[in-house]
Amino acid sequence: LKLARALGVRGFPTLIFSDSTGKKQTVYGSKPYSVFEQALMNLHPSAVKKAYSKSWTAIFTEFNSLTAREFSELTGMSRSESEQLLDELTRDGKLKKWTTKNGSIWTVNA
């Protein structure tokens, strides 16, 4: 807690990004991906965003498990479209859905 106070953390989650000169960008709370991306771009303006395949198979090859919101952010789909596709893939036996009190998580059905 002492370290958190020293770093200016006032809630969770808090992510602190820094560059080699010590310049910092802090993102408080659960934010859209674009906010984290902007924090990094502020520190590294010459960084180039790497293109990636937004197909469900490519996404689940890179990440072992995803929530609908994470899948939505990675694919650029709306949240409702994401849930619909994830549920369809679950019905087809391609994904497995784990339902928790905090929401659902999908994994590849092995």
Image (cartoon, rainbow, N blue to C red):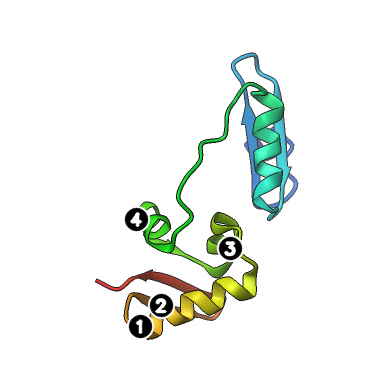
The amino acid type of the residue labelled 1 equals Asp
Label at residue 92: 1
Q: Give the mark nearer the N terminus: 1 vs 4.
A: 4
Taking depth in this image into account, of 38 and 7 the one nearest to the observer is: 38
Q: Give the mark nearer the N terminus: 2 vs 3.
A: 3
SS label for mark 3: helix
The image quadrant of residue 65 is bottom left
The residue sitting at 70% across, 53% down in the picture is: 31
The residue sitting at 74% across, 37% down in the picture is: 8
- Vertical comparison of 71 with 31: above or below: below
- Residue 76, horizontal then vertical, whole percent: 60, 58
Label at residue 72: 3
Mark 4 burial class by Cα count in 10 Å: few <14, some 14-19, many 20+ = few
Q: Quadrant of the N terminus?
A: top right
Task: Write down the residue under mark 2.
Answer: 89
- Residue 89, horizontal then vertical, whole percent: 41, 77
Separation of residues labelled 1 and 2 (CA atoms): 5 Å
- Residues tagged 1 and 2 counted as in contact (Cβ below 8 A): yes
- Residue 27, horizontal then vertical, whole percent: 71, 42
- Residues tagged 2 and 3 counted as in contact (Cβ below 8 A): no
